Image: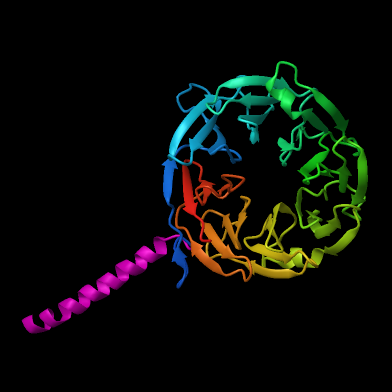
Amino acid sequence: MTRVRAVLRPSLLALATLLLAACAQEDVEPGTTPPPGVSRFVPAWHLQQPGEGASALVHGLLLTDSLDTQATSTVKTIAAVDVATHTLAWNVPTAPGRIDSVRPSFTALGDHIVALVLDRSHYAGRLVVYSRQGAVLRTIPLPNTYVATITDVGPRVVGDQLLVADGAHLYAYDAASLTTDAPILRWQKLINTAQTGSVQISGLDADADGNLYIGTITNEVISFTADGRQRWNVSTSTSPYAGHAPFSLVLDNGRLFVESQDEGLQAYDLATGKTLWNNPADLLKACLGAPTSTASYLVAGGGKVYAGLFGGDCLPAYNESDGSLAWSFTPNYRQTFLSRPTYVNGVLYATNGRTYALDTATGKLLAQGTEDIPAAAGTYLPYDPVQGEVYVWGGQTLYAYKTLR
């Protein structure tokens, strides 16, 4: 009997080990590890620093809005991380005062930084000019009452102008004047095409010649010259109702790509507004087994357009030439790709709660991170060609990944 027990003991231990392993595997969230044969995407460095809104890389500083954790009440701040030294450069209150539920956007203006601050509690919009060291140099109120928006409205510098929108108005400032005591508003335009509602502008982009392109809530794309004259206007939907707005638009290779809810992905000639193709079917069926309606963003590069679909857990790529579906990537971690990816040298870097590197020619998964990154954190994934890194702000932590190519 003693010998039988001795023989069984190793077997029982092995069985117990297998059972414990099985239980442990059940506790592991699906998709936390890369699939077989796929490399783990390991961050080059990380920094614990809360970040809440959209981030942008300006003058070697990764900027985001955050919270002052030392304050007795919610005070918004702008945090700047030096990506060369991996340290927090500064974290200053958003000027002026407190703001609620806002995502500032940033751009470089010479040696300075300009932030768009939308104060929803006071219905006011402001351009705030910062030095590289975080000192507030100028605060420039936008002329009209701020209208709430969730879309990309600038600011961005194109030529000698700074362009910005507040949801209903489009503004063009003399860029050089914004660092002086007398900022010059060259022109402004009220986009008032909707029968009801106050939010008009649903997207903003510009080409190298300074021509502007906006989407409107009434299913339009309008192009303006650099001095505010209308070039062309096209409808992106056959629906007579608002709500099929081109919330997502991107420029590439002389084309404007837009997405208009169930009207689908479309391409227009930048110069004339002529429709090049309209292919809604592939957009709706890209994520098999999951309903999709509209895209939270469009990204272009490598001859393809990449779309983040509300309600779907895949990331599709479409050929710029005709709008056909090139490939669709469905990860083992099934969440929506809410953050906007970045295209670098034939690789698309994206996150849905995990970070992925995808070959854009084939859609093949090259590497996958295991860090737990909230899916809605970080609207953009900035790329720094100097450091060769892509940055993902995961709520409480900033992760830096070296690009693969």
Q: In this view, does 57 lie above or below 177?
A: below
Residue 341 drawn at (x, y percent) = 61, 53
Q: In this view, does 124 lie to the left or right of 392?
A: right
Asked if 154 appears above or below 353 in the picture, the reply is above
187 relative position to 389: left or right: right
* Residue furthest out toward the top: 181
Horizontal and vertical percent for residue 386?
53, 47
Residue 170 spot, x, y in % from top left? 82, 33
Picture mark count = 0
Residue 74 occupies quadrant: top right
Name the one closer to the observer, 42 or 86.
86
Q: Is residue 117 visible?
A: yes
3 up-or-down from 162: above or below: below
Residues shaded magenta = 1-30
Closer-to-camera residue (372/318):
318
Q: Which residue is drawn at 62% across and 51% down?
A: 338
Whether residue 154 can be seen here: no
Query: Residue 21 magenta-drawn?
Result: yes
Q: Which colour scheme is used?
A: rainbow
Residue ID at (61%, 68%): 363
The quadrant the N terminus occupies is: bottom left
How far across and how far down the image is residue 315, in percent?
64, 62
Residue 38 drawn in magenta: no
> Compared to 17, does 210 lie above or below?
above
Q: In this view, does 17 lie to the left or right of 194?
A: left
Predominant secondary structure, magenta span: helix
